[in-house]
Image (tube, rainbow, N blue to C red):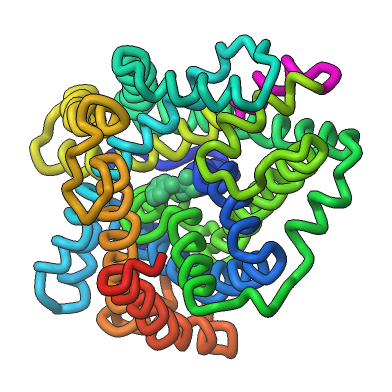
Amino acid sequence: MNSQDRKSIHGIWKGRWTFILAAAGSAVGLGNIWKFPYMAGEYGGGAFVLIYLICILLIGVPIMVAEILIGRRGRNSPANSMAYLAKEANTHPHWKFLGVMGAVAGLLILSFYSVAAGWAFAYIFEGFNGTSAEYYNLEFNNFLKDELKLISFHSIFILATVFIVARGVIKGLEVWLNRLMPLLFLIVILLAIYATQTGAFLEGVNYLFSADFSKIKPSVILAALGQAFFTLSLGMGAIMAYGAYMPAGQKIGSTALSVAFLDTLVAILAGIAIFPIVFANNLEAAAGPGLVFVTLPWAFVNMPLGLIFGKLFFVLLSIAALSSAISLLEPGVAWVVESLKTKRYIAAGALGLIAWTLGILSALSFNLLSDFTPIGDRNFFDSMDFLSNQILLPLGGIFIAIFVGWVMKRENVLEELEMNEGWVLKVWYFLLKFLSPVLVGVVFVAAVFFGVT
Ligand code: PHE
């Protein structure tokens, strides 16, 4: 039975654009707005950007198609969709475990993601009245030492996420994504236009797009591949969960391409908005988390209308993080609602509480628990980041590619994609069956054994 005849108990999105908004909302997040520009700078600008784009196209898009396909055909939470499709393919029901693992990974990511999102949220209320870059450096470090403040903003962020998910797929997700996403795109465009006025615009653009191919090393390729994966929200069922709410008849292939395009556009616009500001003020480009929280407030102070645009920037970062966080919680909540027949607000509250509790440990890892290093020399926050992004997501991605590429019947795949045999399909199958598992496998092994990414 295909997705025409089956309905998700959680609802089907009404708007034709909602799936794209939702998937783009999931994809566009902290990963795009501070991590992408910083990585691009760190790993050689244009050369990194080029490899990143190739990874998005050759690995990200095919796996995204696979996730949407599983979700829409399964019409359930990732765990139950996997179980349904395993049955349809006459294979072992244990494939369900892939969906369960994804839901758990989602909670792990949410726990520390929310702490970082809390920083962005807190910075909306920043006065932007310091008089030196050191001032902001000190201020950020003091902020990280303030347990109560970190936990408060983390709590507010989790509450907002739980609130939206608890309201349900139509009244919560669809309504809020339709409100938040246009705002997000408007702010990115405003900031990019603002950046063209800062003088160092060309220097910034040049930094991002001039390809210095001598900087391409295996570690750069691995970093670009890992970032492509994380930024598209692949490997843990976020896109799969949203696929279950996608109306039948919407073309999966072109939709995935649009989402990847929007995600990439925002990352690049964010880079175009950030680097000119950094260069115009002689700030450190490869400053990691500090790039956003230390250098930008200082940069904004020195510009006309800087206070307003500074606040706008952190509003943007908060919205982007919130629309990603919803998709981290949804796979688990949908699964609990289906399996335990609980009310949605109870499932969202309970899972939110788990993520919140774990997140406390992340918030404390910058102060009270800074000596607690569960994985290698990483504090709790970095350990969660490492465990989910470097291990659980790539592992999930490989198995999703294998499931759709090797396990599902070709006729079912074709039916769901609404496609006929042809070169597009052949290329996609090749990328999914061979290229993605092998390349993602390399990232995974390298990350685990050599800590390269
Ligand atoms: N894609 C999001 C970002 O770039 C993070 C994310 C990963 C969201 C996995 C959902 C699932 O910030």
Position of residue 146 relative to residue 15, above or below, is above
Q: Position of residue 411 (x, y in %)?
A: 37, 82
Which image quadrant is residue 84 in? bottom left
Position of residue 452 relative to residue 218, above or below, is above
The residue drawn where x is 25% and y is 51% is 377
The residue drawn where x is 56% and y is 30% is 293
Direction from residue 185 to residue 115 in the image, left or right: left
Of residue 265 and residue 168, the one placed in the foreground of this image is 265
Is residue 361 in view from this perspective? Answer: yes
Which image quadrant is residue 81 in? bottom left
Direction from residue 350 to residue 56 in the image, left or right: right
Magenta highlight range = 303-316
Quadrant of the image for the C terminus? bottom left
The residue drawn where x is 44% and y is 64% is 226
Is residue 315 in view from this perspective? Answer: no
Q: How many marks?
A: 0
Q: Position of residue 371 (x, y in %)?
A: 20, 37
Q: Position of residue 348 (x, y in %)?
A: 24, 28
Which image quadrant is residue 46 in? bottom right
Position of residue 138 relative to residue 233, above or below, is above
The residue drawn where x is 54% and y is 76% is 58
Inspect the magenta stretch and tell me whether residue 73 lies in it.
no
Inspect the magenta stretch and tell me whether residue 307 lies in it.
yes
Q: Position of residue 120 (x, y in %)?
A: 51, 26
